[in-house]
Amino acid sequence: MAISGLSWDAEERDITVFTMDGKVRVLTYQDSTLVENEARSRIILQKFTEKCQFLSSSLDDNCKEDKSFLDMETSSSQSSTMVARVFGVDASANGYFYAITYTLSSPMDMEYKTDQYDNSYLCFCPSVDSDKIELADSVLQLWSRYRSSGHVEEIPSPGYLYWDIFQFMVYDHSMQNEVYPELLMKLRKYIGYDEEPSNDTTPEDLSEDLFLTKWKKELYHNSTLNSYRAIWNISNIAQTLAFGSEDINLRNIVNESFLFIQRRYLEKVLVLMKSYIQSNEFVILASDQLFVSMACDWALRNYAGDAAMSLNIQKIYEFLGQVKISDSEEGTTLREKCPACNEDLPFDSLRKVKCTNGHGWERCSLTFQIAATPYIRSCSACNIKALNLTSNS
């Protein structure tokens, strides 16, 4: 029976296992029969409890060693009596990784709910038999399967966290040096580009804020959108590899492969955004607002002739002008600053923007970021130029 949730008590060494049939079992973590006939779940629990044990024993020393893996900040207010409560466990499509969505709370705060996103984390556990080079091959095989299909939207998502295999290699420092270069080399070869790029950088995933905050729960259970997400990540990498290349064939391969998927992905994202807007219960973080605007502007620029999509974008823009912006730490509205004079930039279309002093800026066509300094400057994420169009000061 599939696990629907777990909780682990650092003091009592007890693990509470919730399964999809509604049963609850409380066992010690040493119990080899933790979940009968479920080897995968035993590995998950083993890896997760080892991680929690290390973290719990290190809190008093303010140890930050695990931050990159757990994607969390430890603080002196947390103690060895903390509880790690897991709300979702799933294996990747090829079985090399397990992904766990969990929260950290005190034993006095044990309500079973998943809306505490400020304290919700994603933990990746490699399986005991995973081979790192095989992992890179598996990612490419999965990508090939979706890329070669003429009806991507009809392919069911085999596991709603399989794209995180790739993200794990990108963001986890313990594996990045060993695996990621190998993956990039294989990807270059796969798309017919063996030449080493002069500036081998990975652009920030534009959807990171969106998917790991307000829309996490809904998007994790939207199998169609998840199928698009898997390709979206690697399409950004492929576009980076092709950027600046004089190989027209390479550019055509990249463009033809992902134009369809980008359009369908944006359509799904915009519909989800609009549904939240119409709920009248939506408070958006500044980082999420930036991503929403980026997605809208991207769609508006590429699909201006699509009446339905344009209508969705118009409603979202109207909402962004009225929305209450929440900064998770300060509770104040965050705005972009003009690189030339440090004045606030109005939050309107992100294709072009002008501050109150008349400084006008073009945005990067991939990331929509403005330059960090005035005049002609490369975008820090992808090296596409951002220009200071006018200056009245």
Image (tube, grey):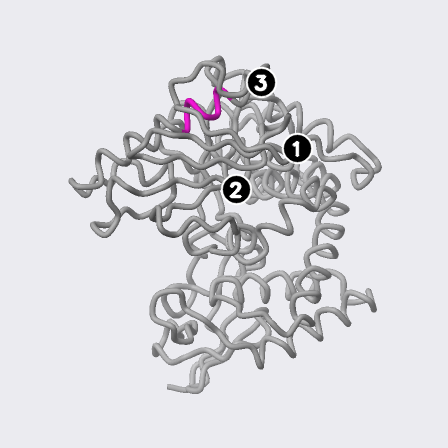
The three-letter amino acid code for the residue at tag 1 is Asp
Task: Give the class, few, some or many, for how many residues have Cα within 10 Å of label 2's Cα (few <14, many ≥20).
Answer: some
Instruction: Answer with left or right where residue 384 lies relative to residue 119.
Output: right
Q: Position of residue 217 (x, y in %)?
A: 59, 50
What residue would you read off at disc 2? 87
Q: Position of residue 340 (x, y in %)?
A: 36, 75
What residue would you read off at disc 1? 21
* Residue drawn at 82 percent across, 65 percent down: 306
The three-letter amino acid code for the residue at tag 2 is Phe
Task: Give the class, few, some or many, for how many residues have Cα within 10 Å of label 1's Cα (few <14, many ≥20).
Answer: few
Q: Position of residue 324 (x, y in %)?
A: 51, 77
The foreground one among 154 and 328 is 328
* Residue drawn at 58 percent across, 28 percent down: 91
Q: CA distance from mark 2 to mark 3?
A: 18 Å
Q: Position of residue 321 (x, y in %)?
A: 58, 80
Q: Secondary structure at mark 2?
A: strand
What residue would you read off at disc 3? 38
Specify whether residue 181 is in view. Answer: no
Q: Secondary structure at mark 3?
A: loop
Q: CA distance from mark 2 to mark 1?
A: 15 Å
The answer to whether residue 45 is magenta is yes
- The boundaries of the magenta stretch are 42-48
Instruction: Answer with left or right where residue 5 lies relative to residue 157.
Output: left
Q: Main secondary structure of the magenta part?
A: helix
The three-letter amino acid code for the residue at tag 3 is Glu
